[in-house]
Amino acid sequence: MDALTAGLRGLTHGIVERRFEVTDEPERRLCFDCPARERLCVHGPERTLRDRSDATAV
């Protein structure tokens, strides 16, 4: 149980600390339902709405 708790804390520490970092590899599956995509994201729709196969070509 202690290992599980520590693992979950490790995975969620950025959320708990309210740090939301922009990905270097945006693509549709990751970005489509992101609430910041349309107005706050540094990546345009040509990157955030591309398919994963297109994302590896850049």
Image: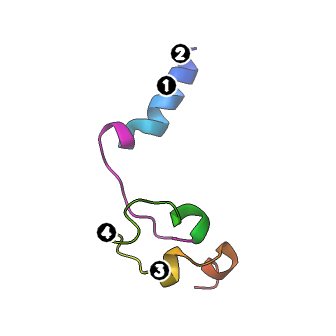
Q: Split into 4 quadrants, where in the image is the C terminus?
A: bottom right
Residue at 64% across / 85% down in the picture?
57
3D distance between C-alphas at marks 3 and 4: 12 Å
Element at label 1: helix
3D distance between C-alphas at marks 2 and 3: 42 Å
Q: Residues within 10 Å of mark 2 (few under 14, many from 20)?
A: few
Q: Earlier in the sequence, mark 1 or mark 4?
A: 1
3D distance between C-alphas at marks 1 and 4: 32 Å
- Between circles 3 and 1, the one closer to the viewer is 3
Q: Which residue is mark 1?
A: 6
Quarter holding residue 3: top right
Q: Residues within 10 Å of mark 1 (few under 14, many from 20)?
A: few
Residue type, numbered disc 1:
Ala
Q: Which residue is mark 3?
A: 45
- Between circles 2 and 3, the one closer to the viewer is 3
Q: Position of residue 5 (x, y in %)?
A: 51, 21
Q: Which residue is mark 4?
A: 40
Q: Position of residue 22 (x, y in %)?
A: 39, 63
- Extent of the magenta region: 15-27
Q: Earlier in the sequence, mark 3 or mark 1?
A: 1
Q: Is residue 54 magenta?
A: no
Q: Is residue 23 magenta?
A: yes
Q: Earlier in the sequence, mark 2 or mark 4?
A: 2
Residue at 50% across / 74% down in the picture?
48
Q: Earlier in the sequence, mark 2 or mark 3?
A: 2
Residue at 64% across / 78% down in the picture?
56
Q: Which residue is mark 2?
A: 2
Query: Foreground residue, 46 or 53?
Result: 46
3D distance between C-alphas at marks 1 and 2: 6 Å
